[in-house]
Image (cartoon, helix red, strand yellow):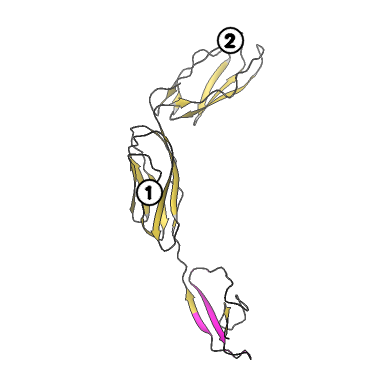
Amino acid sequence: GATVKWYLDAALTNEVLPRTQSKSFVVNNNMSIWVLQSRDATGCPSLPTKVDLTVKETTASLPSSTPVVCLGNSISPSITHTTTGATGIGVATGLPNGVAAFFSGNTITISGVPTQTGTFTYNIPLIGDCPNAKATGIITVVTSNTAGVPSAKPTLCIGTLLPNITHTTLGATGIGTPVGLPTGVTASWSPNTIVISGTPTVSGVFNYTIPLTGGCSGGS
């Protein structure tokens, strides 16, 4: 029977699929190949046929943000994904109630006012030439500013450097004035983390409170 060979050049010197039609090879966009079909066992070929290949893709970028949102507050700014090759979107799954996804001009926009709390991993299927493409991301909705448990509850000697104690926060954008820390010890805030450090100059057992500010109301 006839066999087919595939070449990357009209001179038929760069064969990409020798001996079989079942192999695969990487195709670049706007690539041309030449197909040569043998007619009999002697290998007498037909004239090569040029085939122009166009590669299509359907993709979505990473989200513009993965926000922590207060319950009942609008997602601001909206979350966006830039798409390539998509003509629309299917039904989004995983978004919190009150939040929806819209498609316009190669951009997915996610907006709304969440009415439930939790961590939401969403998937938005893309409509286009390539199946199974989707946009994904995470939205966290909290009722109030929260701080995690301390990383440590150390016991140390007076005048000894305190190993840093950290708290992970959600929703807050800063801290207020701490209450209850020993003299010589302070608290600082960087995005989503409280760091307590210093060298205590007094002895005792100290129960401290650090108010959270910004973001959602309340929390310490």
Quadrant housing the N terminus: bottom right
Q: Residue at x 38, y 25 (%)?
A: 217
In the rendering, at what x and y percent does residue 41 appear? 63, 89
Q: Residues within 10 Å of mark 1 (few under 14, many from 20)?
A: some
Q: Amino acid at mark 2?
A: Val
> For residue 84, which numbered disc appears in the image?
none
Q: Is residue 109 left or right of residue 47?
A: left
In the rendering, at what x and y percent does residue 3 appear? 58, 83
Pointer 2: what residue?
Answer: 205
**Disc 1 element:** loop
Q: Residues within 10 Å of mark 2 (few under 14, many from 20)?
A: few
Is the residue 66 above or below the residue 83 in the image? above
Using the rendered view, name the quadrant where residue 199 is placed: top right
Pointer 1: what residue?
Answer: 92
Q: Any magenta on residue 91?
A: no
The span from disc 1 to disc 2 (Cα, nearest Å) is 52 Å
Using the rendered view, name the quadrant where residue 85 is placed: bottom left
Q: Nearer the viewer, residue 201 or 206?
A: 206
Query: Which is more N-terminal, label 2 or label 1?
Result: 1
Q: Number of marks in the image?
A: 2
In the rendering, at what x and y percent does residue 212 appear? 44, 23
Q: Residue at x 34, y 45 (%)?
A: 100
Q: Amino acid at mark 1?
A: Ala
Q: Which residues are magenta?
A: 27-50
Q: Residue at x 48, y 76 (%)?
A: 52
Using the rendered view, name the quadrant where residue 23 is placed: bottom right
In the rendering, at what x and y percent does residue 63 appear? 44, 46
**Callouts 1 and 2 close, C-beta under 8 Å:** no
Is the residue 199 above or below the residue 36 in the image? above
